[in-house]
Image (tube, rainbow, N blue to C red):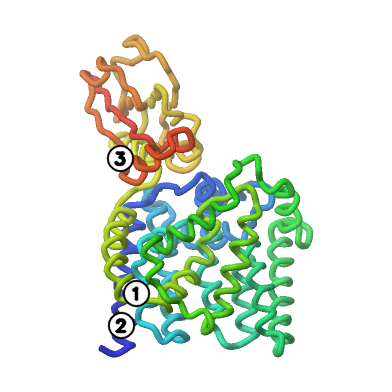
Amino acid sequence: MSFKTHFKIALALGLIFRLLTAYFAYGPLAMDDYIDGVSPALQWAGGEWPKLSTGRSYLLVWFLGSILKVARGWPVVWEIRFLYAVLGILSLSMIYVAYRYVRSTVILYLLAIYCFLPFANTRAFGESVAMPWVLAGVLVPYPFLSGLFLGVASLFRFQCGLLFLTLLFFWRKRFLPYLAAGLVVLGLQVLIDLGSGYSPLQTFTDYWARNQGWAVEYGVQPWYSHLATTLGILFFPFCLFLKPKFKEHWPVVASIGVFLLFHSLIPHKEERFLFPILPLILLLMASGWTKRFQWAFLLINTLLLFVVTFSNPQASMVEPIVEAQRRYEGGLIIETDNDLVGAYIAQGVFLKKPFRLERIEKLEPKDIPLEMDGPVGVMITGFEIPEWVKERSECFTAGSLTDRLLYRFNPSHNNRRQPNTYCFLVTSH
């Protein structure tokens, strides 16, 4: 089979799993991808000017919002699915870059169906959008294009500037075109800030000021957390069978090393912070491919690929809201203990119909209206639903397999991921 044929098969597989992920996994990985991505992009697509968190760039909002304009007017869950599908399709450019600059069938298939990649490529994070730009910037053999691609990645995720600085060493003999690309990107950032109503480079300075304390207010993780995540990406301990060709990929090795070192020194750590270098890690994995690793990889990756693809993150929060609006044109939503009323993802993104939201921890029959006028209804949702409610309702459970696992491993940190019951009260109209 020719290399070009492998490329076409990898593209097809990559497309299929990204579209499946976009359909089934439309919930948020974390609050940030909705608060700073999906929600303001929806507002901007609808003609509003959203207010962003300090240091967040409007570039991401404009990019996501431009995609959402195409699906404007659809039910919100389909707008989000469409957005994720387009992001997934655009991410397939990584396979083309690898096809052009790396003569390896393994990397083509890893970029297509590595278990977490279709999910990561369909998230509304700056880190996700930056991934193809990073891979292209590291692999392309032209200094200006390399600097330009890494610069664009930095516009979406400022930390990618570390990769731009790292590659400067490898372009030291042809550094003028590389630096010229950096100046172009700097000019683009100034234009983005001016278009955002900011002073030049204000987005970056605001972001730096906001994170001067290294974001410890958002949680502190051990220094080795990102290293452990990287070992997980490499399927430790089976990765010990790999024999990566470091000498052939020094720019890749240096980029991964600098990026990991910097992020390991920062107290606050999240898995998504490593998204930009995920394709580079897979490239090293492909370079060291062995048959002994292959069988373990095929078994583990195939299992995880299907689990992640068909698991809706934070399903307990989003699926009840989606189902209530599918059934009714409005009505009443009562929560007992699951913080749905206070959840931004429920009110700020998904809840588009006129439902009244109430929180009643000790629910009694007198709190429930016996009759509702018009095509409306009552939904009661919570982790613990009284038996008398279940007897009078049609009840369902929301919660994906990945959510259940995360909640079991760390209940205090993943409270919103525990299975949630939601009941539609049978009332007379």
Q: Answer yes or no: do the residues labelled 1 and 2 have beta carbons within 8 Å?
A: yes
**N-terminal label among 3 and 2:** 2
User: Dot 2: what SS?
Assistant: helix
Q: Nearer the viewer, mark 3 or mark 2?
A: 2
Q: Which residue sits at x=34%, y=15%?
A: 368
Q: Quadrant of residue 183?
A: bottom right
Confirm whether residue 182 shows in the render.
yes
Answer with left or right where residue 87 lies relative to residue 176.
left
> How far, Cα to Cα, is label 1 from label 2?
8 Å
Look at the picture and state if 241 lies above or below 61.
below
- State the image coordinates of residue 227 (x, y, percent, origin top left): 53, 58
- The residue that mark 3 highlights is 326
Q: Answer yes or no: do the residues labelled 1 and 3 have beta carbons within 8 Å?
A: no
Q: Which mark is residue 109?
A: 1
> How far, Cα to Cα, is label 3 from label 2?
42 Å
User: Dot 3: what SS?
Assistant: helix
Q: Which residue sits at x=55%, y=66%?
A: 130
- Please rate how many residues cluster around mark 3, counting C-alpha atoms within 10 Å: few if below 14, some from 14 to 19, many from 20: few
Q: Which mark is residue 299?
A: none
User: Dot 1: what SS?
Assistant: helix
- State the image coordinates of residue 371 (x, y, percent, origin top left): 29, 17
Q: Answer yes or no: do the residues labelled 3 and 2 have beta carbons within 8 Å?
A: no
Mark 3 residue type: Arg
- The residue that mark 2 highlights is 6
- State the image coordinates of residue 214 (x, y, percent, origin top left): 69, 48
Look at the picture and state if 63 lies above or below 225.
below
